[in-house]
Image (tube, helix red, strand yellow):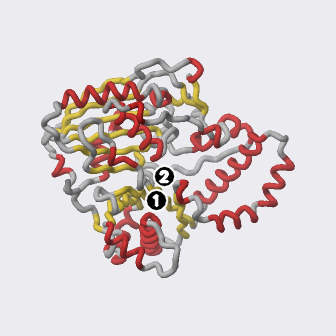
Amino acid sequence: MEKMSVETIKPSLPTPQCLRTLDLSVVDYLTQPVYTYACLFYSNDPSIPREETIQKLKTSLSETLTSFYPFSGRVNGLSLAVDCNDEGAIFIEATLGNSTLSSFLSSPDSNEIQQTLLPLHYVPRTSEASVTWPLLIVKTSYFKCGGMSLGICMSHKLADAASLSSFIRVWAATARGESGTVGKPEFAGINIYPPANDALKAVEIHKPKSIINAGVTKRFVFSGSKIEELKAKVAQPPRPTRVQCVTALLWRCVCAAASKTTTTSTKVLMTLSRKDEEIGIQETVKELRERAEELTSLVQENDGSATDLGSKLLGKAFSDYSKFSNEPGYSMYAVTSWCNMPFYEANFGNGCPVWVVGNVAPRLELVTVLLDSSEFKGIEAWVTLSEEDMLSFEQNPELLASASPNPAVIF
């Protein structure tokens, strides 16, 4: 039995009038209507009363929202901007009467995490457009033993894993009374990509097909020692990173599983941090050369506006991606790494989390999220595939030689 209370948390200071509208970039506009989420698990500290922890979380969240002001607003009806109207974030407090933290972490389940520990039930129709969704929803869930989970959902139109990590870092520092030790965010999407409103005027853009709430998600853990064994198999330098090793093995096993159920060609799309930006330079140069004639043509047709040119280029890129991802005979498999982000340092005054899980919700098919394991040197891979492909994937001997399927979290 779960008991809940719901409260709206507004910024401790009103958002200035000059910041009341945040234009979304074309990339934000095309983002799938999902939340980026992290769920942090904390063991019980009997010296800290529950009421004290909850009040500290609420007060510090209100203070943090003055810097992260768009997250207390709402996306407008056309999905082109955020109305930073201080409508507020949602804070849900829940009590889980029949479950302990240790029993829950003995075999973590993706469905149970999303259905029980995340505040998605507050959004009635997560399969529809996200214009009416709260941009930030938080849920604290207390286990029978006194342990706690903290589920944080931020609209993917405004937040990726790095943004979520930054928000949690600032919120935790504020809760500890150390807000002066962390920087403040900048919401500069349209300084990097064209505004959605301008891009839609410049070129017709087709959104990629929806892959929401599809497939099944399972967890595989690579220990630090197993990752070192994978690295040792690479004969030539440079020595691969742990993320590269795990990604290569996962893709190999996904392709093997897909080949048993379909004749489609599988492509991998991986988001990389700036530390990895040198990866793929040769491929990028080759692609740029192949696109040179198309670029020259676009420049000649352009009226001299950098925004229009950028909109046309991005529009063409997204149209090509949409066409490719919708084309029969191809499957687009995405891997995103959350490794080396300081989620395990999120101390709100009650200690650091014993375990962290992150992903997007509702789930996206053919997406894998890599996170640090609780031992830090290892990697946890949350893999989402079709049910048919997952049956083959999770039985692959090569995968099982390096990864443990959903082991218990020890704390």
Give the number of the disc on residue 308.
none
In this image, 350 relative to 129: left or right? Answer: left
Count the marks. Answer: 2
| Extreme residue in the front direction | 181
Q: Position of residue 31 (x, y in %)?
A: 54, 44
Q: Quadrant of residue 278?
A: bottom right
* Residue 203 drawn above or below residue 375: above
Q: Secondary structure at mark 2?
A: loop
Determine which residue is flagged by label 2: 211
Label 2: few (<14), some (14–19) or many (≥20) C-alpha neighbours in 10 Å: some
Of the image marks 1 and 2, the number of the one nearer the N terminus: 2
Q: Position of residue 84 (x, y in %)?
A: 52, 25
Label 1: few (<14), some (14–19) or many (≥20) C-alpha neighbours in 10 Å: many
Determine which residue is flagged by label 1: 366
x 19%, y 44%: residue: 43
Q: Quadrant of the N terminus?
A: top left
